[in-house]
Amino acid sequence: METIYIAISVHNVAASVEDYSKRFAAEPCVIVPNEYALWRNKGVNFSIRQTNSAHGTLRHLGWEDSTAIAFTKETDVNGIEWERFNAMAQADEIGNIWPSVDYLPSKIEQE
């Protein structure tokens, strides 16, 4: 299974979590206060991260791919970074950046 991954830059994580939770009709599966949030479901893998760059802009795109063996990145002809990863690779990346976050994707999220 492949699911589109979209990562954007935001100015305010708390306000963004409130807004996007309404839009997705779901709460994020990971929240790092004032830094990051992630929503995963069968249709989309969407993350926000508070940055100093232009808010509301694309950070990168990608594919959550259950057959991906390793976390990979490449840049397309327009300079957009694309990642390909499986759910556990994403969980590992989150754990490496924020060691205090205890996040494991559930089986339901992976179906």
Image (tube, helix red, strand yellow):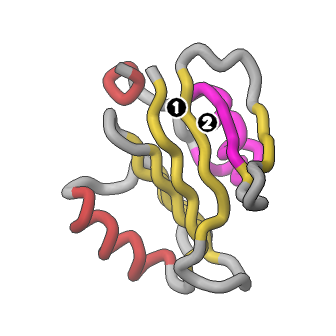
Q: Residue at x 61, y 36 (%)?
A: 91
Label 1 element class: loop
> Magenta residues?
82-101
Q: Is residue 83 magenta?
A: yes
In the image, residue 71 lies at what x, y percent? 75, 31
Q: Residue furthest front?
A: 77
Q: Is residue 39 left or right of residue 91?
A: left
- Labelled disc at residue 91: 2
Q: Residues within 10 Å of mark 2 (few under 14, many from 20)?
A: some
Q: CA distance from mark 2 to mark 1?
A: 6 Å
Please determine whether, in this image, residue 65 is positioned above or below residue 17.
above
Q: Are marks 2 and 1 in contact (CB under 8 Å)?
A: yes
Q: Nearer the viewer, residue 98 or 49?
A: 49
- Per the image, the residue denoted by label 1 is 104
The three-letter code of the residue at mark 1 reads Leu
Please determine whether, in this image, residue 73 is positioned above or below residue 39.
above
Sooner in the amino-acid sequence: mark 2 or mark 1? 2
